[in-house]
Image: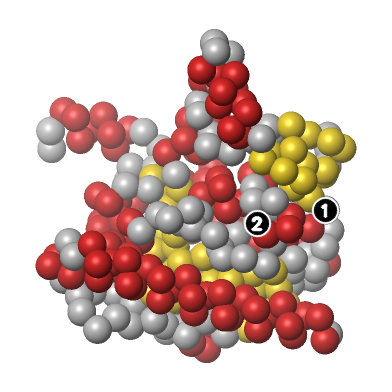
Amino acid sequence: MSKKQHLLNKKPGWSLDERDPKFIEFLMPLWGFLYHYYFRVQTSGWDNIQPQEKVLFVGSHNGGLAVPDMTMVMYDWFLRFGVEQPVYGLMYPKAWQISSPLAQLVVKAGAIIAHPKMAYAAFNSGASVLVYPGGAEDIFRPHYLRDKIYFAGRQGFIKLALRENVPIVPVISWGAHDTLIVLADCYKIVQQLHEWGMPWLFGIDPKVFPIYLGLPWGLAIGPLPNIPLPVTMYTRVCPPIVFERYGPEAASDRHYVNQCYELVVSQMQQELDHLVELTAKS
């Protein structure tokens, strides 16, 4: 092992071995309370997957830094398939920079840094991988966009699926956008102030700078941590999407990658529209 690789493995998120089933088991009662009584989650579609088959779960999420719908999806996985059945979640590097103590905890639940090396390692270990391509722009998208799939044009997950020859399983949710109400994103204004000399919070460019209503701040400005409001959430695991071509050549074909990206976004939007329609009738 090279010196560089040894140093990387010491950082949270750079090793699959940091996942701790006993820690996940410890969290299950708390997650269960949130699942059944605080968020009253209603879910469907888990029969679309087999835990022994490697897939790339691709999600759209809401709810600010608390991302409650993502946590509830993870709880569903462990409840159905057990804490010993691994699934690794890709977490964007900027999120690790904000809080080292938090990073030490999330890696125990299966979070790894969003880097191709770690995604390939997870697949090579026989596990599935969960990614939310929209990142901060997705979790802080304004409330009027709550019914839209928004990945900010990021297509890296498509290339990953093509190179690893794995199907994409969309995971959609609705309701978590009401755990805080994002009024607007003033990132462009703050970016201009930064160019005039105002430093970024924590020295990190978050790509979003929301104004939102939520706990504990009331009215908050910036990507601050939040306590989710207790609202009903709906999640659905959709049927797998299998592409016509796979392999490095397909992953290097920009036109084909864009076609696959548009297909995934389109199908996820249809599934979300259907889920919103069903919740309106319930």
Question: Residue tagged by mark 1?
Answer: 229
Observer-nearest residue: 7 or 246?
246
Question: Residue tagged by mark 2?
Answer: 62
Q: Tag 2, which secondary structure?
A: loop
> Is residue 18 something that shows in the picture?
no
For the C terminus, which image quadrant?
bottom right
Question: Going by the image, does 12 lie left or right of 40?
Answer: left
Dividing the picture into quarters, in which one does residue 260 lie?
Answer: bottom left
Residue drawn at the location 27% of the way across and 51% of the way down = 116
Mark 1 or mark 2: name the one nearer the start of the chain.
2
Residue drawn at the location 67% of the way across and 67% of the way down = 147
Residue type beneath disc 2: Asn
Q: CA distance from mark 1 to mark 2?
A: 12 Å
Disc 2 residue crowd, few under 14, some 14–19, many 20+, Cα 10 Å: many
Question: Going by the image, does 157 lie left or right of 278?
Answer: left
> Is residue 90 something that shows in the picture?
yes
Percent across and percent down for residue 19 are: 43, 52
Q: Tag 1, which secondary structure?
A: loop
In the depicted structure, whether residue 261 falls above or below residue 88: below
Name the mark nearer the viewer: 1 or 2. Answer: 2
Percent across and percent down for residue 171 are: 53, 72
